[in-house]
Structure formats: C-alpha cells, structure tokens
Image: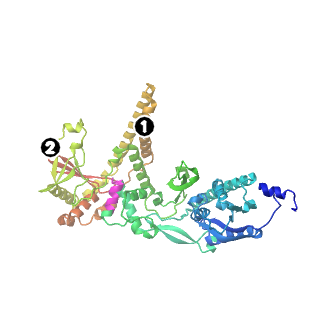
C-alpha cells in the first residue's frame, strides 16, 4: 500500500508535487565574456579574471565550464547578433548535440548594454538554456519581477558607465591639447612625422616603457604642402592642383608613407586629398583636437534592436579645441591659412560664379597648350580654348556658349582665332626684355611701386561690392514680404544672400592686408626662375608652359586691333608688370 493516499491520484492525473529542494548541481555550463581593446585592455588578462569570476560563482553550486565564448575588440553597445563569439553562442543554442545546459557570465555589465538583455533572454528560455548572472546571485528567473527589474537596471548602469568613461577621457584629452599641445596619436598629417620626445609624462605609463610622441617636420612633404597653399591662393582649384602634382610624379600621402595608410590605395593625388590638406589647421603649428567625432547611428531605423554603427562626422565648432601655444613646427602661417579659408567660404557662398574664379582641373591631353589658362578674349573676357589644326595650334574664343541676348554678343566677332606660334614669339621677346640683366633693375622697381596698389585694393573693393549687393537683395526680399509675398517662396534666396553677406563681412574683417616684399625678395624670386634665355632658346613646350605659370602670365587678345596686352604677376602678391604689342 502506498505511503500517501494521494500518490495514486497524482499518478492518474499527472499532478506533480514539489517535494522540496533537490540539489543535483548546476551541471555543465558555457562561459561568455567580452573585452574591449579601445582602452588598451589586455585580452588574456581580461579573459582570465572574467572566467575566474564565473568559476567562483558556479563552482560551489556544482557548475562546470565545458565551453567558452569570448569577444575581443567588440563594444558593449554592439548587439549580440553582430558580435563574433556572441553570435556563435546564439547559433549553438539550436544545436541539440551541445553538451551544456546553461550560460554563465563573468560580469553582467560587460555583456549587456541598454535593453539588450530583454531582447536575447527569451531566446535562451525558448531553447531551455539557463542564464547565470553574478549580479543576480544566481540563475535568472523570467517569472521573477525583481530579476527583470535588476537586469534592466544593470543594462542602464552599463550604458551610463560607458558614457561617463567617454566623457572623462574626452575631457582629459581636451585639457592635454589646450594646456600642453599634446599630440593625441593617430596618423601624422602629411608634412609631419611622429618622433620620440622622451618618457611619457604619466609616471605609470613611463614605468611601463611608454614614450611621448610629438610632430616634427617632414621636409620634402612640407614643401609640397606649402606649394598646395600657394597654388590655391594663385587661383588653382583642388582638382587642378592634384593633377599638377600627379603630372610631376610627386608621391601622394598614401604612397609616401604606406605604413600608416594601409587602408588606402596609393593611386595618386585626388581633389579630396588636396581639400583635406587645405582645411587642416594643424599646419599652422597649433595642436587641434576633436575636428572629427564618432557618432553612433542606428543600423536600421526601422529595427532599433539591430543596434548602432559608428560613423565619423565633422564635429560642431564648439567641440573643437586648440592649444594655447605653438605645439609643433609651422608649415603654413596662420595668416595664409586664414586667407585660404576665407576664399573657400566665399566660394561656397558665391555658388558657381565664385567657383568659376578658380582654375579648374586640366583635362589630360596628348599635346602641351602653352597658353592654357593664360589667354582671354578682350571682348567677353572668356578664356580662349586650344584648337589644334593641321597647320599649327590655334586658340579660339568660346563665344558660342554665351547666353542669348548677352551684351557681349553685340560687339563680339562671330569667330576669334589666334595662332600660337606668333604669340609665343611675342611673349618670349617681351619676357626676355623685362628680365634682361640690363633692365631687371627697372622691372624690380616697377614691382616695388605697384605692389599693394592693384590686387589688394581690388580684392577689398570686390568684397565691399559683394557685401553691398547682398545687403541690397536682403532689403528687397524684406520689402517683398512686407508687400504680401509668401515668405516661404524667398527662403532659399534669402539664405543665399545671407551667406554671401557673412562671407563678405568675414573677408573684409579678417582677411590680412596685402603685404609688401623687399627688393631682395623680388630679385630672389626672379633668380628662382632659372635660365630664362636657355628655356626660350630650347623651346621645350613643357618648360615654357612651366615658365609662363611661374610668371603668372595673363594675356588679353584684341581681335579688332590684332594686338595683345600681357601681364606678369611673378607670384609677388599679384604685383604686375604690363606690356603689349
């Protein structure tokens, strides 16, 4: 006879009665941990202490670790499905031949972030796999409201801890840049190289052998950087500068230093490379930090559970810091850098009309056009195009592209052609005349008297004109709104006018006044042209084209008089020597 009268009843109806705790041991478990390498954590050490914590936690309960999953270099904000080892663990849940019945972690805040636990815990439960979390003191029970609340708090604490660490690290790095001009690592800008500057100022890091690294000049690359800024101020655009560097076989940054540019293809200079150099303020000798920032964006806005991905974007101006003192050698004076930025802003505000003022990229050709970019039609002021013919090279005015009804068409000849050969002879004779040793003193004196009176005043007057024009348009738009025009219809036009106004004000208020140079500097610049007579006698097209570029040659062709007016800038603050025939 059964010891209990209910035993037969329970057997018939399948009723199970809790007979009290029976400790058969936790059994075989899998271990999961994670180590981020961003703060120089040692993966072996991190794996060791996390696994040790897990063993101390489940060991007294009879738990044995028979499998291990450990992510290295994965941020805690990355969902489990996108972590290498965590995704492998989730896939193993479906394997009926797995030898473990539960998963234990070494530290919950390292494994789960935000609401991640609530998204994956049901999957473990669906496959009958227990989760053992040290912060809970035991196994997670989905029917226990306290467990759910504690795991939610744990995820929030993990997220908060990460944000606090990020804020503290950023604040410390900002202070190091502002007060010490510290180089914060990363690839050195083109034109500099990283050198050893002695023991690390942090005593603990110095004891571990860390060294302080600073930026020093890379002489050959620094000369290229200086040239890029000079070419831009002389009217060349980003792509034209890049093409010129490629023609001269000057190695691009990724080719010059492949060891720090393994992620790039050394395929020559690009316009984007030139742009990044022109916009990098570290060439002024001051340390800058925070110009680019990491931003976490949803991988799929329609699936928040898919988590975030990291993207680098331009930081807001108030997030960028600069050292108080010069931190490394200067390549570009701050005045020159400022002038370049003002021109770029003015170009951006002025739209296509301002962009057209810069020399655009030259198309690759099989022949050298000696006067490409130097010759203009005097009637419409457009640059004349090279037009090869059977009997020689000609230049023609592209008047066909003028808009119908343009005032220039009224007095413009149907066709304007000029042959290169006689023009080359005239230009060479004039250059030899102004640069002849017997007359070079008069040329230098003319440059000394002219500098500061032409281009500088003209540039400032042009800026004032743009300012007056923008203010006038803004007044007209405001009057139109007052007269009843829908403001929404004028938003774009007002924004454009406002941008042009700000750019002109910045140019007038911040652009440095054109400087002056001494006679000795002008003589040195003329000497740097080399043997002009030999270039003319040799008549090598490439050398002559380079000479005309260095002279800043500008030619206006008067078709009716069959005459040209020539101007040489000599790259001396756009000071000019005039001539004609």
Give the quadrant of residue 441.
bottom left
Please say which color scheme the image uses.
Answer: rainbow
Disc 1 target residue: 492
Residue 533 placement (x, y as % from top left): 20, 65
Q: Is residue 338 left or right of residue 152?
A: left
Q: Nearer the viewer, residue 481 or 81?
A: 81
- Magenta span covers which residues? 233-245
Disc 2 target residue: 560
- SS for tag 1? helix
Q: Check if residue 165 falls in the magenta segment.
A: no
Magenta segment's dominant SS is helix
Residue 150 placement (x, y as % from top left): 73, 54
Give the quadrant of residue 428.
bottom left
Disc number at residue 476? Answer: none
Q: Give how far apart the Cα atoms at labels 1 and 2 are.
A: 43 Å
- SS for tag 2? loop
- Please tell me how crowded label 1 is: few (under 14), some (14-19), or many (20+) other residues with Cα within 10 Å: few
State the residue at coordinates (71%, 61%). 133
Is residue 212 visible from the viewing direction of this image? Answer: yes
Q: Is residue 473 left or right of residue 166?
A: left
Vertical comparison of 82 with 469: above or below: below
């Amino acid at each position: 006879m059964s010891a209990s009268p209910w035993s037969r009843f329970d057997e018939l109806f399948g009723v199970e009665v809790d007979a009290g705790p029976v400790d058969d041991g936790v059994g075989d478990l899998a271990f999961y941990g994670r180590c981020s390498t961003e703060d120089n954590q040692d993966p072996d050490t991190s794996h060791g202490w996390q696994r040790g914590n897990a063993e101390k936690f489940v060991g007294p309960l009879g738990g044995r670790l028979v499998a291990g999953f450990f992510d290295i270099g994965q941020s805690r904000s990355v969902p489990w499905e996108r972590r290498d080892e965590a995704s492998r663990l989730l896939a193993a849940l479906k394997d009926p031949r797995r030898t473990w019945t539960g998963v234990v972690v070494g530290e919950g805040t390292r494994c789960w972030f935000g609401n991640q636990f609530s998204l994956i815990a049901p999957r473990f439960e669906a496959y009958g796999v227990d989760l053992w979390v040290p912060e809970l003191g035991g196994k997670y029970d989905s029917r226990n409201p306290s467990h759910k609340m504690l795991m939610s708090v744990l995820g929030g604490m993990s997220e908060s801890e990460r944000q606090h660490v990020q804020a503290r690290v950023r604040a410390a790095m900002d202070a190091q840049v502002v007060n010490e001009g510290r180089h914060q690592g990363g690839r050195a800008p083109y034109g500099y190289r990283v050198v050893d500057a002695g023991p690390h100022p942090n005593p603990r890091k110095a004891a571990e052998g860390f060294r302080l690294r600073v930026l020093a000049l890379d002489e050959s690359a620094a000369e290229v950087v200086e040239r890029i800024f000079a070419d831009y101020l002389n009217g060349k655009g980003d792509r034209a500068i890049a093409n010129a560097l490629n023609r001269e076989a000057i190695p691009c940054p990724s080719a010059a230093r492949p060891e720090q540019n393994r992620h790039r293809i050394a395929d020559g200079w690009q316009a984007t490379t030139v742009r990044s150099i022109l916009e990098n303020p570290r060439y002024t000798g001051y340390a800058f930090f925070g110009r680019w920032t990491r931003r976490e964006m949803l991988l799929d806005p329609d699936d928040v559970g898919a988590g975030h991905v990291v993207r680098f974007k331009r930081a807001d101006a108030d997030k960028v810091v600069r050292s108080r003192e010069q931190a490394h050698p200067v390549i570009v004076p701050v005045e020159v850098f400022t002038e370049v930025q003002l021109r770029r802003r003015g170009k951006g505000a002025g739209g296509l009309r301002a962009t057209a003022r810069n020399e655009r990229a030259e198309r690759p050709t099989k022949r050298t056009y000696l006067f490409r970019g130097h010759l203009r039609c005097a009637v419409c002021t457009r640059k004349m195009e090279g037009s090869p013919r059977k009997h020689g090279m000609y230049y023609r005015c592209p008047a066909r592209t003028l808009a119908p009804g343009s005032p220039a068409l009224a007095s413009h000849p149907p066709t304007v052609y000029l042959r290169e050969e006689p023009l080359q002879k005239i230009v060479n004779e004039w250059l030899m005349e102004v640069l002849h040793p017997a007359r070079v003193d008069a040329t230098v004196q003319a440059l000394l008297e002219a500098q500061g009176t032409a281009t500088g005043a003209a540039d400032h007057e042009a800026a004032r004109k743009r300012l007056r024009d923008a203010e006038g348009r803004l007044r007209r738009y405001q009057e139109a709104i007052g007269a009843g025009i829908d403001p929404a219809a004028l938003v774009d036009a007002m924004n454009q006018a406002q941008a042009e106004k700000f750019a002109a004000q910045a140019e007038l208020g911040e652009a440095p006044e054109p400087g002056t140079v001494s006679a000795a500097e002008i003589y040195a610049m003329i000497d740097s042209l080399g043997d002009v007579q030999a270039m003319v006698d040799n008549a090598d097209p490439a050398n002559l084209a380079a000479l005309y570029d260095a002279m800043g040659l500008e030619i206006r062709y008067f078709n009716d008089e069959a005459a040209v007016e020539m101007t040489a800038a000599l790259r001396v603050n756009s000071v000019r020597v005039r001539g004609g025939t």
